[in-house]
Amino acid sequence: MADTTQTTPPARRRTDPTDPTNPTDPGDGSGLPRRSVVRALLRLWPYVRPVRARLSLAAFVAVIASCLSLVIPLVLKWLVDGPVADGDPGGVWLGGGYLLLLGVAEALLFGLRRWLVSRPLAGVEAAMREALYRHLQRLPVAFHDRWPSGQLLSRGTTDLQMLRQFLTFPLTFLLVNGVTILVGGVLLVAQRWSLGLVLLSPLLPLLVLCSVFEAKYGRAARRTQDQLGDLTTMVEESVLGIRIIKGFGRHRSQARAFKELTRALRTTELRKARLLAWIWGVNTALPELALGAALVFGTVQVADGALSAGTLVAFLSTALALRWPVESIGFLLAMSNEAAAATDRYFEVMDEPAVRDEPVAGVEPVARDEPVAGVEPAAGVEPAAGVEPAVRVEPAGPVHGGGPRDAPGGLVFSGVAFRYPDAPPDAPPTLADITLHVRPGETMALVGATGSGKTTLTALVPRLYDPTAGRITLDGRDLATIGRAEARALVAVAFEEPTLFSASAAENVSMGAEGAGEAELRRALRVAQAEEFVAALPEGSATQVGEQGLSLSGGQRQRLALARAVISRPRFLILDDPLSALDVHTEALVEAALRQVLSDTTALVVAHRPSTVLLADRVALLSDGRIAAVGTHHELLRDNPEYAALMSGGEEGDR
């Protein structure tokens, strides 16, 4: 039996920040890239640019509102040194009115700021989420083989929510608080330069400590978000695989694995909390000490008559107004680092090169009269080194479904080789020197042992992967010259594992042909022998089949997937063991209907059972990623021992 590692893409791995092979590990054991927070956040500019005017206005409004709080101490100075000192009740009431107006104006301006940013930033989040989803649809299948779905899901949900929160609050208030501290510092020095220097003395130590905090917190924030993605992956896998978990009684082991991930996440979150508590404590303690020192010095100066009581009150009020801008530095830096980590994670996906949907320039199509039948390799394509010519057994009779035996066109593989992008360098190729011609209107069965490359070969036709060598032609047109959208309009596929979506039965089938009408839907259901059970559903074809179609049996899901493949009457049909989940009676009915469909198309069918093989005009035997023999079912049974063993059940013929 062939090695299955040849035909399956590399397994998905959970993120391991300490893995030495992790490209994001800078080598310091953190598992995170050394990156600038500012540089990371600047990558958001293309999404923020359309709403920059409104964000700028909101920031300006917030600066004005914050600066109003610095006017209050000046009013207090006037109030203490004037009306209070002079015993003027009218002046006291007037001063109180000024303070009330300033407070109301500040509150209204901050409310206006919130209103200005809410709608546009919700739009920014939606635009980034839509861009991510569109990009995911255009990424190659190899990317999805490599990335856990939970990591992608967390990037499209929690990471984007974090970015919206950053744009809503920290981005604005880093600017607002900076301006407030600058203006407040000028006012402090202007009122009493000696006391002002005392109050501003903690700024330099705070900047140094915040720089240390930022580096440590950034690494912890990134690790948290990666661990949350792993946790999301496990929850998703557990929900989708709940029948397996319950069926094998593995709920305890799954719970233990989940607990380990949860504890790891909890440990990282506690580290973040300790760092935040440390910086918050320092940011609070140092300014408070400076404020206490300034209060003592100021009181002494008032007692000596060198400073008025109103000036001291104004000075202390200004200092108190600066408490929140200074104390919030750690909090704002923490949110900025989390946003930078979320930005890095988002662009890790967006930076992945998307699959080009247009034809490859400079590739000439194959001439229709080129002799590329399933006997000889295509001209100009050398067979792989050390590969013996495959045995070719041609049928004696006419080809089913149209045309003379040497008819051009159809589906042609010419010296095709393929290796998965993430396969180890020393691993043998999954496919090597595949030269095969499926004639127009012909049905070719693919038979082979586990790991022989059948499913991989069929995945090349709709361009889920592209060959690493050789070429494939559809009716004489090189597949490389056909855009993916056009190729997938020509080719319909029914995979071995039927995938259904959270939609109605009709919508799932109609995905195979955009704009298909009721007549086409009924015909496809009839071919797949699904018409009867669909009609028996509570709402007929409008019944929602649930996530992954789990409300249906395996055979019902497979029949809907088959109906989806045939609804468009494709020119080329790829079926990967389409009848594996059907009972004998239903299989016979589907086979009878499929014969009519296959007579009008060129088909490649992965087959594991003799009953499916008999649908085909010819059979290609794959062995270790190479075509070992081509012929009719009866000829290969007679002349090829490996094929005879597979058909007799001597060797498993799966995938």
Image (cartoon, helix red, strand yellow):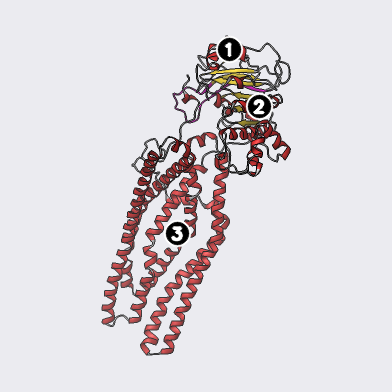
In magenta segment, residue 384: no
Q: Which residues lie in the magenta part? A: 410-431
Q: Which residue is mark 2?
A: 589
On the image, the x and y values in percent for residue 632 come to 63, 14
What kind of element bears circle 1? helix
Q: Amino acid at mark 3?
A: Pro
Query: Is label 2 in a helix, a strand or a loop?
Result: helix
Q: Which residue is mark 1?
A: 637
Query: What residue is rendered at 64% in x and 25% in y?
Result: 588
The residue indicated by pointer 3 is 170
Does the image show residue 641?
yes
- Residue drawn at point x = 40 percent, y = 44 percent: 33
515 and 352: which one is in front? 515
Whether tag 3 and tag 1 are in contact, CB under 8 A, the answer is no
In the visual, does 150 lie left or right of 496?
A: left
Q: Position of residue 417 (x, y in %)?
A: 55, 23
Alpha carbon distance from label 3 to label 1: 73 Å
Q: Amino acid at mark 2?
A: Leu
